[in-house]
Amino acid sequence: MRTLLVTATCASNVIISVVSTLLYYRELYALKTSPLFATQLNGAMQAAICGILLLTLDGSGVAPRKSQPPVAMRRWLELAFWFALQNTLEIASIDGLGPAAGSLAAVLQQAVVPTTLLVSIVLVGRRYSALHWASALTVVAGVATSFTAGASIPKIPWGWAAALVASRLPQAIANVRTEAALTSAEPAVRQELRSVLRAGFWTALFGLGFNVLSGLLLTVARGEPPARMLDDYRTGALCLAPNGGCDGALSAVLAYAVPGVLFVVSEFAVVQQASASAYMLLVALQLPLVAVALSAKPFMGSQASPFRPALLIGVPIIVLGLGLWALAERRAARRRSIELESALLADGTSVPTFRIQN
């Protein structure tokens, strides 16, 4: 049952990721002059929708139930900080890479896979087998194959490339911390859903403040006056008005609202049901699928990117890597079960007749 739940959660996340990313890009195209406003608007909608869902679920609201181990507000604040730092470094480095950003960025971002494994070893004492590492490297190789086969990469600004790789560290820390926060919840599905929604609510709410600071830093880094950020917000707000001059902006924002929240919720659910490391491997599978979807003219219209068949070459390699990871997890669960039985026998305790499921 547990394996089925994890599989369903991961499959749902992949589907939701592709759909929500398409709608997200359509929103960005509609609000192309106001990316900072779009970020704030999405965060506000996420907090609002997660809060409403929590109230609808059982009226418990956003505060932890007294029967649950409370997750301190400072933990959600910490997560919002790490996510904001990752976002700031990523946007700045992609801007700095310029024409080299495309395929190169997709490959460099996979540094998050080994980084997440290392961070989970340091922060939560996770142990990984050689098969785990082999599966991670296989996934990274699959992404590299998809985005470099047949692609020409211009001269690389190595400083900005290093900054993009560095942005994976706060992302890895945030995901591992998220896993620790969410796995402290009671195992009932209803409780797990409530915990995921709270994670979405608080990280989005605290993120609004960090987004302002992030936007200010990015504006200054681009050599623009701080007032440019206010212009971004004002222009974006006017775009949503009936006669704002941005055709389809309001409909694009509304179309993304629910799928965007579903993506965040499914992201947290995968981290909770599987692990932060497993989620990073799953993201690698989403990359070429999203790239192919963005080239579909029925969805993207005139904004569709050119289709490259080479994008699909690495998908079987990524799937192989995910299969190796699943095998490694099954072996690790079996090893933990045997170790527990041995410890119980050594203490003279009767051994349960069931095996531990992971």
Image (cartoon, rainbow, N blue to C red):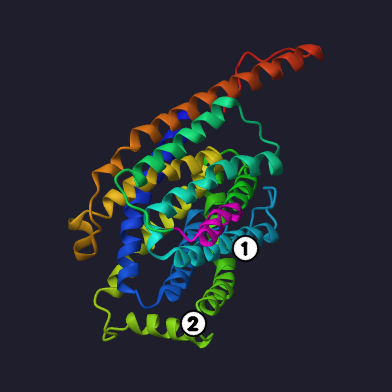
The residue pinned by badge 2 equals: 229
Estimate how packed mark 1 is, as few (under 14), some (14 to 19) or many (20 or more) residues with alpha carbons within 10 Å: many
Which image quadrant is residue 311 in?
Answer: top left
Residue at 60%, 16% (x, y): give it: 354
Label 2 secondary element: helix
Q: Quadrant of the C terminus?
A: top right
Name the outermost residue toward the front: 155
357 sits to left or right of 341: left
110 sits to left or right of 75: left
The residue pinned by badge 1 equals: 81
Chief secondary structure of the magenta portion: helix
Within the magenta stretch, is there residue 200?
Answer: no
Closer to the chain start, of discs 2 and 1, is: 1
Q: Tally the marks.
A: 2
Label 1 secondary element: helix
Q: Position of residue 135 (x, y in %)?
A: 49, 31
Report the front residue among 351 and 253.
253
Q: Position of residue 64 (x, y in %)?
A: 64, 55
Amino acid carrying label 2: it is: Met
Amino acid carrying label 1: it is: Phe
Looking at the picture, does residue 183 appear above or below residue 34? above
Residue at 31%, 60% (x, y): give it: 23
Within the magenta stretch, is there residue 168?
Answer: yes
Q: Is residue 127 visible?
A: yes
The region drawn magenta spans 156-170
Residue at 57%, 57% (x, y): give it: 60
Report the front residue among 234 and 162.
162
Looking at the picture, does residue 186 appear above or below residue 253? above
Closest to the camera, between mark 2 and mark 1, is 2
Report the front residue among 175 and 132.
132
Which image quadrant is residue 119 in?
Answer: top right
